[in-house]
Amino acid sequence: MATHRRLLLLLFPLTLLASCAAPAQPGATPATDDDSPTPTAAKTTEVSGSHPRAVISHDGGLSTVDLATGDTISTIPTEGLVRLNDSGDGRHVMVTEGDAFRVFDGGLQAESHGDHSHYYASEPAFTDVSYTAAKPGHAVAHGDHTALFGDGDGSIQIIESDAIAEAGAPVEKLAADAPHHGVAVRLGDGSVLHTQGTTEARTTVQVRAADKVIAETTNCPSTHGEATAKPSSGGDVAVIGCANGAVVYRGGAFHKVAIEGNYGRSGTLAGSPTSTIVLADYKVDESAEHEHPTQVALIDTTDASLRLVDLGASYWFRSLARGPHGEALVLTTDGAVQVIDPDKGTVTASVAAIGAWQENEDWHAPGPILKVSGERAYVTDAAADELVVIDLHDLEVVERHALGVTPFEIAIVTGQPDQPHEH
């Protein structure tokens, strides 16, 4: 069904695009396959292959970059602090601007036709679709659905990822008991995992189905961050960060991750569909205003256990990612991307990516970011205004693209959702 819905979305008329069609990407030639479908809008051009694109927010604008050439395809003016989240369909980006999640079209789409695919390119543009939410916060794509959380009103909106850019797409709506900086995840059985709290305190995580609470924990102070993992048996597995050890939702119940002492805070987590282990940051100094940790946590969701890995250098909340085979990746302040075997808990490689850097005291200031799509890792260098591309198979830098702007946040679009790679 997911494939069917994705095909319907890709064929949906692109009348929402606000600007003219882009020419074929560099090096691309029009396809001539006899069963090639007729593009549904003149603003879209069929091309022989698709280069991934990076959507980058920066002071005063939103730029889209061709990751094969480093060329900036377009820059669209924006105002204020613009944050980016993946939409879940591989094509669109959720842009938090003002009191709405706005849907931005990265201009790439791919259609699978059995033994071959067709690729289309168009000019990146904001669509006419947006989802109103007071202080829009996290957007989480999991399975076939994307959940949007409004920090200012506690609203939760859930949309099929393949329909995220469709005007009038069905939206499942529910709400937390009170506004707070929260998160929601739509699970595969239709239930919704989400946080509960207030603007002063957050301690509770619930799973709800049809307005009924089917699982709950109140032992998660300072709830922040979520990730899903490969289930060891049936059902979804999710992890939520807390100040006294994370909690794992598995088998219809919450399981507390044991830590040494009373304080071990995780707030940024990265999961993988090919691994039962979740990567998380780990802070141990409760009195520190700005702690700079040098250890990361590997949370085994099968038994709610934790293993710490020392990296020899610190990192920040935009430093964590997962590779295509479940490897844990961390961008440290020495400028390297550390590669960790999550099963063994050891650093297996280190790739020099950018110059040494320091974490900003104000998280709103631009700093380096690590993102992964397919077999490539992308590192933004806010000091040099560059985008560094790493081949995760050969573990080497393959491109350095000059951006001409200082990147704040980044999202990668390929035209189709990332597919997990099995070991």
Image (tube, grey):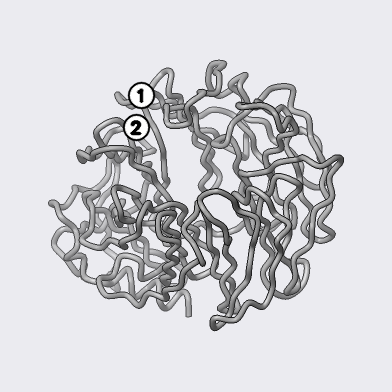
- The answer to which image quadrant residue 365 occupies is top left
Q: Are marks 2 and 1 in contact (CB under 8 Å)?
A: yes
Give residue 324's position: percent from left, percent from top. Answer: 61, 49
- The answer to which image quadrant residue 41 occupies is bottom left
Q: Which mark is residue 402?
A: 1
Q: Is residue 352 left or right of residue 107?
A: right
Q: Residue at x 29, y 58 (%)?
A: 120
SS at badge 2: loop
Above or below, comparing residue 386 to residue 200 in the picture? above
Q: Is residue 19 left or right of residue 270?
A: left
Q: Residue at x 13, y 62 (%)?
A: 42
Query: From this viewpoint, is residue 74 visible?
Result: no
Q: Is residue 193 left or right of residue 122?
A: right
Q: Is 215 in front, or is 235?
A: 215
Instruction: State the residue position of label 2.
Output: 70
Above or below, comparing residue 295 to residue 416 in the picture? above
